[in-house]
Image (spheres, grey):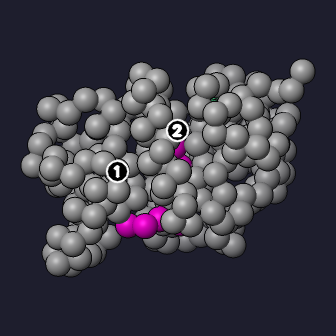
Amino acid sequence: MIRFEKVTKSYPGTGRPALDQVSLDLDKGEFVFLVGQSGSGKSTALRLILRETRPTNGRVYVAGKEINRLAGWKVPRLRRQIGTVFQDFRLLQNKTVAENVAFAMQVTGHTREEIARRIPETLELVGLDGTAERMPDELSGGEQQRVAIARAFVNKPMILIADEPTGNLDPATTIGIMNILERINSTGTTVLMATHDATIVDQMLKRVIELDEGRIVRDESRGAYDSPA
Ligand SMILES: Nc1ncnc2c1ncn2[C@@H]1O[C@H](COP(=O)(O)OP(=O)(O)OP(=O)(O)O)[C@@H](O)[C@H]1O
């Protein structure tokens, strides 16, 4: 589903590359944690998958296509197949919960009937039934993140990218969010999550890819946050 072939990314005017000859393969339906210290290259890897930035060398494939060679007009279609969730939720503050989620379907050209059907079932999936008409600032952080996940998932993307989705949440709320990501993963969506949350990684025992100064230093199935001693 996602493949990096010797991917190097150097930002102009910086010293060592943010990613240095990184190769990896994620299969459809996998749940993968991306870990590593601040600055190790996690966000850069995620941005390459979305083609928000391009590799300096090497190739990035998403669903079999080399995305660096994708024509510019095809990039929106690529991004529609990838849901994204961030630490800071990024909701539209002047829209209700339902409107935030509906927005993702409107821009992808769904009919009003499809939207009307899909919103309640998606809000239910993330445990937010009954909140459709609330505004984001009336919700807790955990609830806002659930809205963001609903928005990311409403189009049933093949990939869900989550960059520190629990970074602003307390441990109990974090567990709820992780349960939702697992539920989404169980529908067949590949989940790639960058995190600093050792407790979660240790509890979930999923595949762990660790970056250090732009290089993969560990790739373990059912791994923990820290390398085995
Ligand atoms: N737009 C940019 N321009 C220049 N350098 C950048 C840019 N984005 C990231 N970098 C550099 O690339 C390296 C990797 O950064 P990246 O954001 O990918 O790390 P990260 O592992 O996601 O860190 P964090 O855990 O803090 O989010 C860092 O040295 C960073 O300073």
Relative to 174, say whether 25 is above or below: below
**The image quarter in which residue 102 lies:** bottom left
Q: Is mark 2 within 8 Å of ligand 1?
A: yes
Please give the range of residues in magenta.
155-162
Q: What distance separates the C-alpha of mark 1 from that of mark 2?
A: 18 Å
Q: Can residue 7 be found in the magenta stretch?
A: no
Q: Residue furthest left?
A: 133
Measured as percent of width and height from the top left, residue 120 is found at: 22, 62
Which residue sits furthest right? 229
Which image quadrant: the N terminus?
Answer: bottom right
Q: Which mark is residue 126?
A: 1
Q: Residue 112: x, y in percent? A: 16, 75
Q: Amino acid at mark 1?
A: Val
Q: Nearer the viewer, residue 165 or 92?
A: 165
Identify the element where label 2 is drawn: strand
Q: Which quarter shows the C terminus?
A: top right
